[in-house]
Image (cartoon, rainbow, N blue to C red):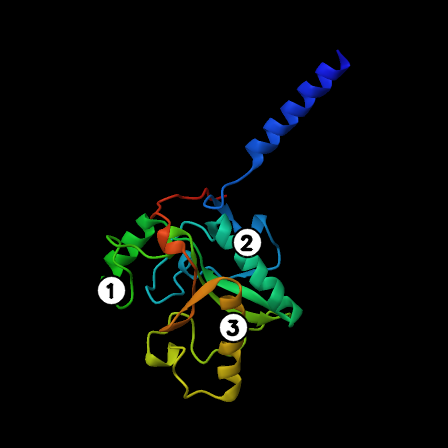
Amino acid sequence: MKHFLLLLFLLISFSNSAQEIISDTTFVRLSDYSSDFVFDMKYATADNFLKAKVYDCAECYLRLKTVKSLIVANNKFMKLGYRIKLFDCYRPISVQKKMWIIVNNPDYVADPSKGSIHNRGGAVDITLVDMTGAELDMGTAFDFFGIEASHRYDGFSATVNRNRRKLRKIMVKSGFKSFDSEWWHYNLAGSNKNSLSDFKWECP
């Protein structure tokens, strides 16, 4: 009888553990997995190039596999005395449609009929801050749409170029791909295979 009860206990425990396993493609909140990031979710305010608030509240959700790789990158940065600051994360396709209505120009906003990696939960818009919270000089502001935002632009000071290289080097080594025309944008490799999503998080 004791052996039977022990076996039953183990089976129940295994079943509960199996239910707690989360798929790598599940949308999760980054702050539930790490408190080491800084957040400035621009599209939850009007402080962005749209001049409009398109998120109901400031949250950063991503697919779990993106979160894992981002934490790896942030741990590397923290060893150097920096942290990742996030401007945008996963973006529901319904929000993409809102943005397209405001600025229906594919040079600035992805056409929602095609979507973007943001809509697939695999993209982040980021910069680096030091341990006091001060942003490193990247030459332009986030969402600056000019040639100066490109990784290829070399008209900045050695400090700016070094800061951009530092961000890019660690992000790429952590499994992300840079986006040539936007120094702040990184896609997790392979995220283009994920489906577009309109998952919406609950606001407090």
For label 1, the crowd category at 10 Å Cα-Cα, with few meaning under 14, some 14 to 19 and many 20 or more, is: few
**What is the total number of numbered labels drawn onto the structure image?**
3
On the picture, is 192 further left or further right than 128? left
Disc 1 marks a residue whose amino acid type is Pro
Which circle's residue, 2 or 3, is located before the other in the chain? 2
Q: Nearer the viewer, mark 2 or mark 1?
A: 2
Q: Which mark is residue 37?
A: none
Secondary structure of the residue carrying tag 2 is helix
Residue 109, image quadrant: bottom left
* Secondary-structure class at tag 1: loop
Give the residue pinned by disc 2.
68
Measure the C-alpha gap from mark 2 to mark 1.
30 Å
Whichever of callouts 3 and 1 sits on the residue coming sooner in the sequence is 1
Picture quarter with the N terminus: top right
Q: Which quadrant would residue 147 be assigned to in this image?
A: bottom left
Q: Is residue 105 left or right of residue 6?
A: left
Residue 37, position as x, y percentages in the image: 58, 60
- Of pointers 2 and 1, the one earlier in the residue sequence: 2
Mark 1, residue position = 106
The foreground one among 55 and 25 is 25
Vertical placement of residue 138 versus 14, above or below: below
Q: Pinpoint residue 50: horizontal percent, then vertical percent.
A: 32, 64
Residue drawn 37% across the image and 81% down it: 148
Q: CA distance from mark 2 to mark 3?
A: 17 Å
The amino acid sitting under disc 2 is Lys
Furthest-right residue in this view: 2
Contact between labelled residues 1 and 2, with CB atoms less than 8 Å apart: no
**Residue farthest toward the top in the current orientation of the protein:** 1
Q: Which residue is mark 3?
A: 169
